[in-house]
Image (cartoon, rainbow, N blue to C red):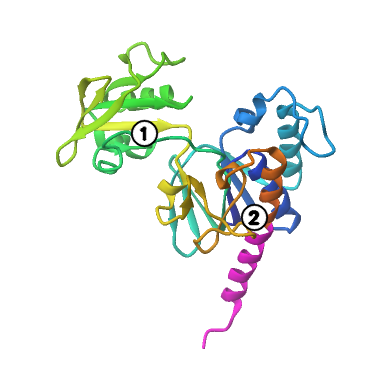
Amino acid sequence: MVYDIIVLGSGPAGLAAAVAARSRDKSVLVIGRRWQDSPLAKAERVDNYPGLPGRTGLELLEELFRHASSLGAEFVTGKALSLLAWNGFSVTVGSQVFSGKALILAPGVVRAAKYPGEAEYLGRGVSYCATCDGMLYRNKAVVVAGLAPDAPAEAKYLKSLGCQVVYVSPRQPEGLDQDIPYVKASRLAVKGEQTVTGLEADGALLPCAGIFILRRTVAPTDLLPELETEEGVIRVDRSMATNLPGVFAAGDCTGGPLQVSKAVGEGHVAALSACEYADAQNNKRKEPQL
């Protein structure tokens, strides 16, 4: 199935976009972590959302999610690992690929500076997806840099493939297989020659053939390298359009103020713009070929 609109992000901006798009009768897929895991869910009291003062962040998100679900928005819990912009958009989540005509970026704030050597060796030993690339390292030594809640499960999967796994993170993770060695470290650097040869963890070298860096989210500029940013945020116009055709952005990823009302408003505008774009694409396909 090709969705009219794919939304990356299940926070207030993404959910508001889903509501607006479904109100225009567009098929919508929201890809992101569970809405309960949004930073907003931890807010004990939100007093600056117009008309609904005193709600908890969890209550606001639950209402937004319920509204979007009741209108028929579909949801996939997971992390977008790669994105192909050709004849629409194809987004990879684990081993699944989802296609859409327009794309809305609403990942929130992604504060994830790359480790030294990470960008240089991406695809040459550095991977962001154990499910996608694990088989390439069967029976080889790999390191998992665990920065996401699902990283221990990914490490267990790699071990099941026959990989010799070492798990590295700043603190002891919950749910890590007892048979997987754990190294506590926070200063990491990727080392290699033509391909990865090891991970330096707080000064100690861990020899390996592959490094799986598993963060909560992949930065939008990693998914779309040509995406324009300004001072660390995605650059958009009044219609929430980015510099890339068919790509829109909303919420904290476009800059401050980092407030729910701003995220919801931008999500709504981005969805309306994405609907117009999807309609234009549909009309092009209907035009007779001369």
Q: Nearer the viewer, residue 260 or 211?
A: 260
* Residue 1 appears in view: no
> In the image, is residue 288 part of the stretch drawn in magenta?
yes
Q: Counting residues from the N terminus, which is met first, the one under dot 1 or under dot 2?
A: 1
Which portion, as a residue range, is magenta? 272-290
Figure quadrant of residue 157:
top left
Q: What residue did someone put label 1 on?
A: 130
Tell me the SS state at disc 2. helix
Query: In the image, what residue occupies the spot 70% across and 52% down?
Result: 268
- Describe residue 25's horizontal placement relative to residue 105 as left or right: right
Question: How busy is the neighbourhood of tag 1: few (under 14 within 10 Å), some, or many (20 plus)?
Answer: many
Measured Cα–Cα span from mark 1 to mark 2: 32 Å
Q: Residue 270: which disc?
A: 2
Q: Amino acid at mark 2?
A: Ala
- Describe residue 251's horizontal placement relative to residue 196 as left or right: right
- Describe residue 242's horizontal placement relative to residue 92 as left or right: right
> In the image, is residue 256 part of the stretch drawn in magenta?
no
Q: Nearer the viewer, residue 261 or 68?
A: 261
